[in-house]
Each structure stands twice: as structure tokens, then as C-alpha cells.
Image (tube, rainbow, N blue to C red):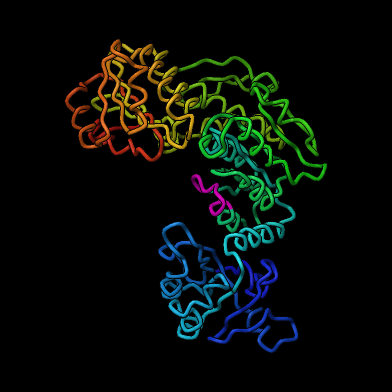
Amino acid sequence: MEKLMSFSGLGDAVGARMFTWEGKQLPVLQSADPQSAVLQSAGFSSVSIDSRDVLPGALFVALRGSTLDGHRFVEAAFKAGASGALVALSALDDESLDLSGLCRKWNRVLVGVDDTLKALQKAAAVYLKQFSGLTRVGITGSAGKTSTKEIAAAIIGQEKSVVMNKGNYNSETGLPLSVFNVRSHHEVGIFEAGMNNPGEIADLAKILDPHIALITNIGTAHVGNMGSRDAIAREKKQIFSCFSGNNTAMIPMEDDYKHFLGSDVHGRVVYYGASSLSALGDVKDLGLTGTEMIWDGKAVKFKLPGKFNYANAIAASALAVELSIGADSVQKGIESVKPLFGRGEIFKGRVTLIRDCYNSNPESAEQALDFCDNLEWPGRRIYVIGSMLELGALSEKAHADLGSRLASSCAEMVFLYGEEMKAALSGIGETTTHFFTQDKDELSHEIDKYVKKGDLVLLKGSRGCALESLTEMLLGDADVL
């Protein structure tokens, strides 16, 4: 397989302080050192942080988490064929790990650094800079990052070779791992940047150094870790922090933080939205089957339902226009988009199921309820609502407000699941028939007893609720609409 980087090149990129080769600890090698030729020829062809995913010739990066220490899986990575491992210097001194012994046993390379996560990020940044012909695009925001990225890739990929994060590999580890998928034939790299804590977007911006950076919106996702929407806006704005004057910031014109986001940006600022797209004509909501829009005079069907998904399509189309993608490619790209797991999937079985349970926060829950309430539907509406996680001090009020919103909804029955949903009980009151539980099996049993053929069922909750586990019970064999 193609070698991505030599071990000596990796050492230079990450500021390694020590190599271990054949069990011998060596200082960082210079070109004159006799072992340098060996390390120049030895390298890695992929990167992994999970020993179960290691491919032959990979670099295994040993990360220390809150419950697991990756250094304890170095031998498993070597057994799977890893050619080397990036390890912490402190781990090299840990006799219980005996990393030098493993290095000698398997004849592999260890590269020692102070912090393996920071080293992974530095290596990714250096690797990415090799591709001078690649247009680097960064996408962040409180919601819609993954969908916007996927839609943009579908459109831009009609004309150019595109590389992007797989799924939601947008974290402090996921994004650098995704960067190592770039190859010389790629013309555009579209990478989403997510965050859980302060400082993470700035770190990801240093890796990407994006030519174009797009913010989808400022909401309340992860507000429990950030403290406020103001803090979230400040953090998301860091996607522009590496701008050097020739970069482009794309900001949603309808977001109430647009002026803050667009201020003091060291580059060109583009405010995007439906009214900024001259090719966009009439738009028609098709309910469960999506949206029809006129693009450059031609009717185009976008299969993802709801105004929130339409907003993601507008963001992706604006990015495509910024990259001078032709109208025909925009039309074909939009029509090729299919729903992602847990993001507005529609299934038809004994009930019609809207599976929107990849994540949840006050904004996305409101959007899902508005969508279901406004559908033309002849039967009953049943809403299965799981906890909205990571809201911190705002959690109790947010869930109480959600309860009030459910009380005014069109639901015939509301099922509430998760500890945080206790707070919704005060808001939902007695006006709406509801059932609350923290037990998934009990939830499944009660829903199964209640639903009947022809019902519309919404599954909406945070990832930790795993409401998708109810799918088979609700549908049996079903088709995606």
C-alpha cells in the first residue's frame, strides 16, 4: 500500500523526542545517523487509534482516555500488522507496559512524544499541507454539520474529486484520522469540525487551515459544556482563527449571531441563505417525501424532509456556488442525496416511522415537532421523545419547555424516555395523554401495545437514548420511503 509518511518524517512533524527501534532507545535521528536510512524507508500506510481496526502497515496511536489506556493495546496493534506506534514518553518508562520489549519482540518502531493526541493532530496538519492543490473546506455549527457536508459532497463530487470525514468523524481524534484519507487525486476536502469543550474548534482549525469555512447555525447543542449560546458562538467562530486574508467565511444570514460571526474576520465574508442564491426559484414542501425546488429553471427533488434539512441543502448549495460548481451538477447532486442514519429517515411498515434520533437539543426537537404537527396526516400521531443530553444547568428548564411544547402538539400519545424527561412532566400536564419511563424494555412494551396500523410515529432523542432500537418492533420488515 502507498506509504503516507516515513517514521523519521513523522518524528520531524510531531517533534518526537525519542525513537525506539529493535528495543533500543535512540534520540531523535538526524540524517547522518546510521539508523536514519532504516527509518526513512520504514513508514506507515494508514493511521488508527483502535487496535481492532488496525490494518497491515498502519501507525497505531496510543491515546489515554478516561477509562482505557491505548498503550495497553500496542501489542494487539503489532499483532494486527501495525508497523509502528506513537506513544507517550511516560509510557516508555512504565515497566508494566514493557513497550521496548514489545518493540524488540515484534521488530516495530515506537515514536515517543509528550502528548500523543497533540502529536496526532500535528502529524495530520503536516500531512494535509503536502496537498497544495487541495481546496480545504471546514464546516461547523450546532446542527446540520454532517448533513451539510454530505449534501455538499454529493453536489461538488459531480465535478471534482472530493474527500470528506466518514460519518461524524469530526472530533479532536476523528478529524485528524479523516485527514489521512486525503490522496493526491483529491481536489476538494470537505471536513466537518465538531466540539464538546472549549478550545477544540481552534485545535481543529489548526489542522485544517481551511480555505473556506462555513458555519451552519448557532444553537444549544453541548451548551452544558460551554455554558451559554454566546460561548458556543465564540467557539464556533474559531473555525476562522487561522485565516490569513485570502480565506472565505460563510455565515448564515438568518442566524441571530451573524453580525458577531462576521466581525473581525481576517478574510472575505459571505452571508448565505435562500435569498443569496440567484439560481434558486420556487420551493414546495412535499411533506414526508422532501422538498421540490427550482434551480436554474429546473425542478429538483430533495429527498430529505423538513425545513431543517432544506436549510442544510441551502448551505451546501451556497458552498457549491462559491466553488463555481455548475447548475447541472447542483441539480444532479441534490437529487442524489439520501437520508443518513438517524437524521430524518422515513420508514413504511405497520406504521410510518420518522427516525430522527441521532441527536437532540431544544432547537432540533422543536423542528421535529413542527414538521410532524404540520404534516397532512389522516391517522394518529405518536411522539416518542427521549432525553436531550449535554444541556448542563439548562437541562431542567429545557425539558420542562419541551413538555409544554408537547402539550400543545398534535400528538395523540406521547411516550417520554430517560431521566432528564422527568422535568417534562410538569410542562406536559394532564392535557396530553403520555407515558414516562426510564426502562427501555418497558418503553418498547408499552409502545408495542399502543400503536396500530396507519399511525405516524416520531422517534426523537439524543444519541445516548438509542431510540433506533425500537425500529424493528415498530416496523418489522419495512421500506425506506
Q: Position of residue 89 (x, y in %)?
A: 58, 73
- Residue 240: quarter of image: top right
- Residue 179: quarter of image: bottom right
* Rendered view: 152 above or below 299: below
Residue 97 appears in the figure? yes
Q: Position of residue 189 (x, y in %)?
A: 64, 48
Looking at the image, residue 226 sits to the left or right of residue 238; the answer is: left
* Residue farthest toward the front in the current orientation of the protein: 393
- The magenta segment is 166-175
Which residue appears at 81% of the width and 45% of the height? 244
* Rendered view: 116 above or below 208: below
* Residue farthest toward the right in the current orientation of the protein: 245
Looking at the rendered image, the quarter that the N terminus falls into is: bottom right
Which of 106 and 337 lies nearest the eye of the viewer?
106
Which of 400 and 109 lies nearest the eye of the viewer?
400
Please check the rendered image and state whether residue 348 is part of the magenta-colored stretch, yes or no.
Answer: no
Q: Position of residue 296 (x, y in %)?
A: 65, 22
Q: Position of residue 107 (x, y in %)?
A: 50, 84
Which residue appears at 58% of the width and 47% of the height? 164
Looking at the image, residue 132 sits to the left or right of residue 194; the answer is: right
Q: Main secondary structure of the magenta part?
A: loop
